[in-house]
Image (cartoon, rainbow, N blue to C red):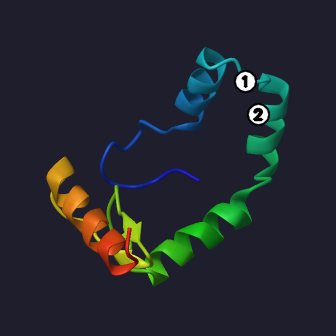
Amino acid sequence: MNWDGENEGTYSDANLRTFGEMNGLFMNQFDECMDTNKYLSKVESDLQDGADAGVNSTPTIFLNGVNITGPNEYSHYRVKIEEALAKVGG
């Protein structure tokens, strides 16, 4: 399963295989997994779960089940984490 749109082609089967080789994967297991779509249903389920939860970009960050995705600055997330900790007395 390859994504459409942004970075199209980056995650082609050939490129994924190259990434696997570069990272020392057991390529016979990798090839079998890719050829049989061993985890396709799990990936599709996870994708649907993300969509159901309102995920529409990466990264998407949840804190205590609340989507806190915003600016990518550390300070944004630090404030949200500190607010959550204050609620539980941390």
Of residue 63 and residue 69, the one placed in the foreground of this image is 63
Question: What is the C-alpha distance between the residues marked 1 and 2?
Answer: 7 Å
**Residue 39: image tag:** none
Q: Residue at x 28, y 70 (%)?
A: 68
- In this orientation, which residue lies closer to the viewer: 6 or 26? 26
The three-letter amino acid code for the residue at tag 1 is: Leu
> Mark 2 — residue?
30
Q: Residues within 10 Å of mark 1 (few under 14, many from 20)?
A: few
In the picture as drawn, the residue positioned furthest to the front comes out as 89
User: Please, is residue 5 above or below residue 67 in the view?
Assistant: above
Q: Quadrant of residue 71?
A: bottom left
Q: Residue at x 26, y 72 (%)?
A: 83
**Would residue 13 appear left or right of 36 to someone viewing this image?**
left
Place of residue 44 in the rendered image (x, y in percent of width and height, measured from the top left): 62, 68
Amino acid type at circle 2 is Phe
Residue 63 x/y as whole percent: 39, 70
Give the residue at mark 1: 25
Quadrant location of residue 23?
top right
Instruction: Of the two numbered discs 1 and 2 on the same chain, state the one appearing first in sequence.
Output: 1
Image quadrant occupied by the C terminus: bottom left
- Residue 4: % across, % down: 40, 55
